[in-house]
Image (cartoon, helix red, strand yellow):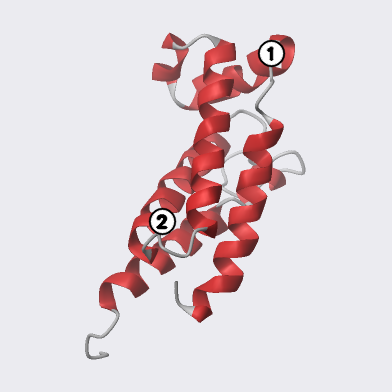
Amino acid sequence: MKLAHLPLRVSIGAYILNSGLGKRNLEGAAAEGMHGMAVAALPQLGQLEPARFAKLLSYSEMALGAALLAPFVPAPLVGLGLTAFGAGLVQLYLKTPGMREPGSIRPTQQGSGLAKDVWLVGAGLTLVLEGLTHGRPRL
């Protein structure tokens, strides 16, 4: 891991890892609510039971958080994971009613929490691009 990546990877990795740990035991109404929002954005997730979805989301977040924290995981690889995760959250923001002002991509008060996840996409793409262009002549 490059020293310059350390602040980005540690801060995002610890946050996502903690989020996944917090979802380990979700059941009942909490799992159903999270599953319902996800299905609204990605209908194919409706094939999963809410409790199973919550477990898979928890494991995915723990794996991504740990990969970001692990210095031996290459930046482009962990960047791809972070980009995909962030893109899923941005899709959730764009497709969930009430998250955006009518006719706009600007967030409502309720949507601000999800709208900020676009930063995860930017951070992930930064890791991918920097990793792929490292050592090449600059434009």
Q: In the rendered view, tell whether residue 14 sits above or below residue 1.
A: above
Q: Quadrant of the C terminus?
A: bottom left
Q: Secondary structure at mark 1?
A: loop
Q: In the rendered view, tell whether residue 67 sits above or below residue 9.
A: above
Name which of mark 2 and mark 1 comes first in the sequence: 1
Amino acid type for the residue under numbered disc 1: Glu
Q: Return the x and y of residue 116 as percentages of the image width and height.
A: 63, 53
In this rendering, position of residue 16 left or right of residue 132: right
Q: What residue is shown at x 54% (from left), y 58% (from top)? A: 69
At label 1, counting other C-alpha atoms closer than 10 Å, the crowd grade (few under 14, some 14-19, many 20 or more) is some
Residue linked to disc 1: 27
Residue linked to disc 2: 78
Between residues 30 and 43, which one lies in front from this camera angle?
30
Amino acid type for the residue under numbered disc 2: Val
Residue 14 numbered mark, or none? none
Between residues 13 and 89, which one lies in front from this camera angle?
13
Between residues 106 and 30, which one lies in front from this camera angle?
30
Specify the quadrant of the image occupied by residue 110: top right
